[in-house]
Image (tube, rainbow, N blue to C red):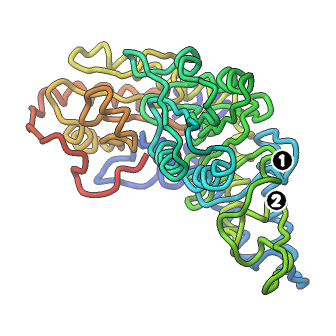
Amino acid sequence: MTAEQTSSGLSRDVRADFPILATDLDGKPPVYLDNAATTQMPRQVLDAMYDYYSNDNSNVGRGVHTLGMRATDRFMRSRERVRAFLNAAQASEIVFTKSATESVNLVAQSFGRQVVSDGDEVLISGLEHHSNLLPWRRLCEQTGAALKVAAVDEHGEPSLDSFRAQITERTRLIAVAHVSNVQGTVNPVRDITAAAHDHGIFVVVDGAQAVAHRSVDVRDIGADFYCFSAHKMYGPHGTGVLYGKAEHFERMEPVLLGGGMAPIASYDGPLISMPPLRFEAGSPNIAGMVGTAAAMDYLDGLGRDAVHEHDAALAARAAEGLRALGGVTVYGAQAPRGGILSFNVDGVHPHDVGGHLNTFGIATRTGVHCASPFMDGLGLVGSVRASFGVYNTMDEVELLIESVKTSEKGFWSTNHPNERFLPPGRDSG
């Protein structure tokens, strides 16, 4: 596949960078369109992690031996790489976690408990992933605050006005996804943040579906916190990032206590701990953060504007082609999309469509995508989600469209009950 055949702004064909794309799946090459759940890793990321384990593997911190100092240096450089990737003001504003989910929970249970109290309100959008819903619901239940939801329109998309309509004098915090994990809606997070700050409201942005598809400048967005997971941006599993403004981290208490997060401990003396280590108790995932930094190098090497153009073009063509089939509903009205779209075939259960596509070697995600309330609001048992990455091509988009067309002939309504867990297993976002 040539760069020209991708119809994108990418300067080269990147598929050879990803070993898994050269594998054989039941006699077919993989057509991997499940990037919103997890992306594949390029050799550059795999090599960086292998190099760390092969040459520098040790714990970080106070070791004065050579391997310990090398590991510490690579870990510190990874934090600085993340700072630069997000254009944060200082490296101490970057906290390493195991996932975006853990990042949101940390903010909710530390910062949220300080600023939200009985009678206050926390505002989220009507399309949030469970990871940006359940931690805030729990916080409200713990504090006596009310959880409010900014309405979505008939296309399932929120607007700046829908947030403004819900803001009251008791609103203390807004949590919103940068990009919807269901239908790729790109929320106006910069404008939402500005409107919130006009009322003294703090803002948390879930960027899990944004960082792989577009440039993210946390100082330009202005949000108080921004988080994401590496495995959705060509990095490894088990690594996450929480950006927070320095003044917020200074006031926050740690949720986990243990080794590494305090330089000195005692039986009864004060606990002295500084950000970001204050929030990173225990041995860190050093190789994971080395891999995360390598993934950021990889994306910047391709050019994040070019990546955005590529992913948006694939999603736009997929939406256009699927809508033209007839009998297929593509959800959402926004274009260009954030590299994600969801659809259903009339009279065919989404799990059946996903299984049918798999016979063509096409990997999609089916279900509620960890966004049950949003799907309930649309009156859906689930949907089929196709999500695109740098290694996907227009040829693969055309194969998706042609394969969906045949699902009308190959399947019929299976009368599944309105249940969310077929086939067995986790419905990962």
The residue that disc 2 covers is: 275
Q: Can residue 364 be seen in this view?
A: no
Q: What element carries label 2?
A: loop
Q: Does residue 202 lie above or below 68 as drawn?
A: above
Looking at the image, which residue is at 53% across and 39% down?
391
- The percent position of residue 355, horizontal first and vertical second, equals 23, 44
Q: In which quarter of the image is residue 207?
A: top right
- The percent position of residue 215, horizontal first and vertical second, equals 70, 32
Q: Is residue 150 left or right of residue 273?
A: left
- In the rendered structure, are the residues bearing label 1 and label 2 in contact, judged by CB atoms less than 8 Å apart? yes
Q: Is residue 321 visible?
A: yes
Looking at the image, which residue is at 56% across and 14% down?
161
Residue 193: numbered disc: none
The residue that disc 1 covers is: 246
Looking at the image, which residue is at 87% across and 76% down?
69
Q: In which quarter of the image is residue 348?
A: top left
Q: Identify which amino acid the numbered label 1 is placed on.
A: Ala
The one nearer the camera, 292 or 195, is 195
> Which quadrant of the figure contains the C terminus?
top left
- Which residue is the extreme one toward the right? 64
Q: Earlier in the sequence, mark 1 or mark 2?
A: 1
The one nearer the camera, 343 or 177, is 177
- The percent position of residue 401, horizontal first and vertical second, equals 32, 25
Q: How far apart are marks 1 and 2 (CA)?
A: 8 Å
Q: Identify which amino acid the numbered label 2 is placed on.
A: Pro
The one nearer the camera, 197 or 83, is 197
Q: Is residue 313 left or right of residue 93?
A: left
